[in-house]
């Protein structure tokens, strides 16, 4: 077989829809199998609990989506998404202090996850070459350890079972993927798995932002400092469509996440800076608190199996899940879809699925190591990874990471390189290059910032006064 005829995608979320679009570019027909009934408007659904928390589509991921679906970014912006330029449009208290707002290097698209999903899904399904099977559960893989030939299905409403044949099956079913069990059911060895679990939990709530703030006020990020050796607490205020702020509070294991409305604002007192509290204490909450424990980093290594079945690839959260606080999940899924697209442009004979899986796995390596290596620095992190980059030599790596973090908030040149890596525009290996090492030890750093780098116009927009006028604890609402 040099060209698969029919493809099945398990899962109709972000990664699944991008995979389906890629398959439709190369195959005669594609079927997406999804457990939920997908909404016909930007609305939350049961199968994506992470959608109720803050999301960002980094410039690397946005560029891939734009290449696959030209005009998507423009449509999102027209619907109210915000294009945040890094570091200009972000006020961040990092572990090492306030980040200077240097001229923009990369960007991120910020809006609610339902708007992102719906916009991309509607554009993809409009092509007419993809069949969507909703309220349908995949029970197993058909075939054997040498070749996957389809999937066993069950209609959730009627209970009717059937086998749907395919030349290529893509598992993009997400965090709850059962692909490891499916593969052992075909007689294959267990797929290796690494887990780095910092116990991250999230609580989010939507607020009505002050007039004009979602277009003109920066996003806010108050991070924990791992060097304090206590559970980390984080808070962000992200602009969303329809004049709303998404406020997400989070903590590592032991941080006592607020899950009740009456505790939400009080939790902001435990953050390292009062800016989040100052911003939301005078605005109207629009939703209840949504709480989730989604912060585990988990990666499968299907490419390591000596014998991988033809006709199967795994991508998205089925392959690698990252702590959402770093914002890499959607871009990593887009990278996986792009890798699959490139592989399908070649003859797809025996062994091609294994080759494609290696390419997809390579595409998630940088976001994996960035998220996992940051999380192991926090207390109470449970690390069962075998990746040598996450085991031996941890002290030396953390010392280097702290050096980079301390320099990047004050040096525009170092910040540019770090931003390129964080956005996945440049590889993680850039941080070990001789040019970057020389840059780390050059002069030209700005002074430390004693308070959030907000302009007077920005403070006026949200009703804050300069901290120098109100005392040491910080800016307060008028």
Image (cartoon, rainbow, N blue to C red):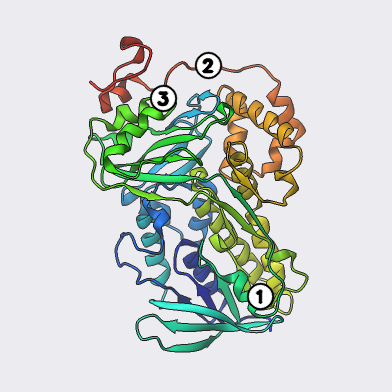
Which numbered disc covers residue 273?
3
Instruction: Rate crowding at label 2 as few (under 14), some (14 to 19) or many (20 or more) other CA atoms within 10 Å.
Output: some
Q: Is residue 8 left or right of residue 91?
A: right
- Residue drawn 37% across the image and 66% down it: 122
Q: Is residue 326 left or right of residue 278?
A: right
Q: How much space separates mark 2 and mark 1, taking CA atoms?
A: 55 Å
Q: Please give the residue where the numbered disc 1 appears in the rendered image.
A: 184
Q: Is residue 345 above or below residue 458?
A: below
Q: Position of residue 120 (x, y in %)?
A: 41, 62
Mark 3 lies on a secondary structure that is loop
Q: Position of residue 356 (x, y in %)?
A: 67, 67
The answer to whether mark 2 and mark 1 are in CB contact below 8 A is: no
Mark 2 lies on a secondary structure that is loop
Closer mark to the observer between disc 3 and disc 1:
1
Nearest the eye: 454 or 178: 178
Which of the 4 image quarters holds residue 170?
bottom right
- Residue drawn 33% across the image and 59% down it: 44
Q: Position of residue 118 (x, y in %)?
A: 36, 62
- Residue drawn 62% across the image and 54% down it: 364
Q: Please give the residue where the numbered disc 2 appears in the rendered image.
A: 448
Q: Is residue 477 above or below residue 8?
A: above
Nearest the eye: 8 or 175: 175
Which numbered disc covers residue 417?
none
Mark 1 lies on a secondary structure that is helix
Nearest the eye: 221 or 88: 221
């Amino acid at each position: 077989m040099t060209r698969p005829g029919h493809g099945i995608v398990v899962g109709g979320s972000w990664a699944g829809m991008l995979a389906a679009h890629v398959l439709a570019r190369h195959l005669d027909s594609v079927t997406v199998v999804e457990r939920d009934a997908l909404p016909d408007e930007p609305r939350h659904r049961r199968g994506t609990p992470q959608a109720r928390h803050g999301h960002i589509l980094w410039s690397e991921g946005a560029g891939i989506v734009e290449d696959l679906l030209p005009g998507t970014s423009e449509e999102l912006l027209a619907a109210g998404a915000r294009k945040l330029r890094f570091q200009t449009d972000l006020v961040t208290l990092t572990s090492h202090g306030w980040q200077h707002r240097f001229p923009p290097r990369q960007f991120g698209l910020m809006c609610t996850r339902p708007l992102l999903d719906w916009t991309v899904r509607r554009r993809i399904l409009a092509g007419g070459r993809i069949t969507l099977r909703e309220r349908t559960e995949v029970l197993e893989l058909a075939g054997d350890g040498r070749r996957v030939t389809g999937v066993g299905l069950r209609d959730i409403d009627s209970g009717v079972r059937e086998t749907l044949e395919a030349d290529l099956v893509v598992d993009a079913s997400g965090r709850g993927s059962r692909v490891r069990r499916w593969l052992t059911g075909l007689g294959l060895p267990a797929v290796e798995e690494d887990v780095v679990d910092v116990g991250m939990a999230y609580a989010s709530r939507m607020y009505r932002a002050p007039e004009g703030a979602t277009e003109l006020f920066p996003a806010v990020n108050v991070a924990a400092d791992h060097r304090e050796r206590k559970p980390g607490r984080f808070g962000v205020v992200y602009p969303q469509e329809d004049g709303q702020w998404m406020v997400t509070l989070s903590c590592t294991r032991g941080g006592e996440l607020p899950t009740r409305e009456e505790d939400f604002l009080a939790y902001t007192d435990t953050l390292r800076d009062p800016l989040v509290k100052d911003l939301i204490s005078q605005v109207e909450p629009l939703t209840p608190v949504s709480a989730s424990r989604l912060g585990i980093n988990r990666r499968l290594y299907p490419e390591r199996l000596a014998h991988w079945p033809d006709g199967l690839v795994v991508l998205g959260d089925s392959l690698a899940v990252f702590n959402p606080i770093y914002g890499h999940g959607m871009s990593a899924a887009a990278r996986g879809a792009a890798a699959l697209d490139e592989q399908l442009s070649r003859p797809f004979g025996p062994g091609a699925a294994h080759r494609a899986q290696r390419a997809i796995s390579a595409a998630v390596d940088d976001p994996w190591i960035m998220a996992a290596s940051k999380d192991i620095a926090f207390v109470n992190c449970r690390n069962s990874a075998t990746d040598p980059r996450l085991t031996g030599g941890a002290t030396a790596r953390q010392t280097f990471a702290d050096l980079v973090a301390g320099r990047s908030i004050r040096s525009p040149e170092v910040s540019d390189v770090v931003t390129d890596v964080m956005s996945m525009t440049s590889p993680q290996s850039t941080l070990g290059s001789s040019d970057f090492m020389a840059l780390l030890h050059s002069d030209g750093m700005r002074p430390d910032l004693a308070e959030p780098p907000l302009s007077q116009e920005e403070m006026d927009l949200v009703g804050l006064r300069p901290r120098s006028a109100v005392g040491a604890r910080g800016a307060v609402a008028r």
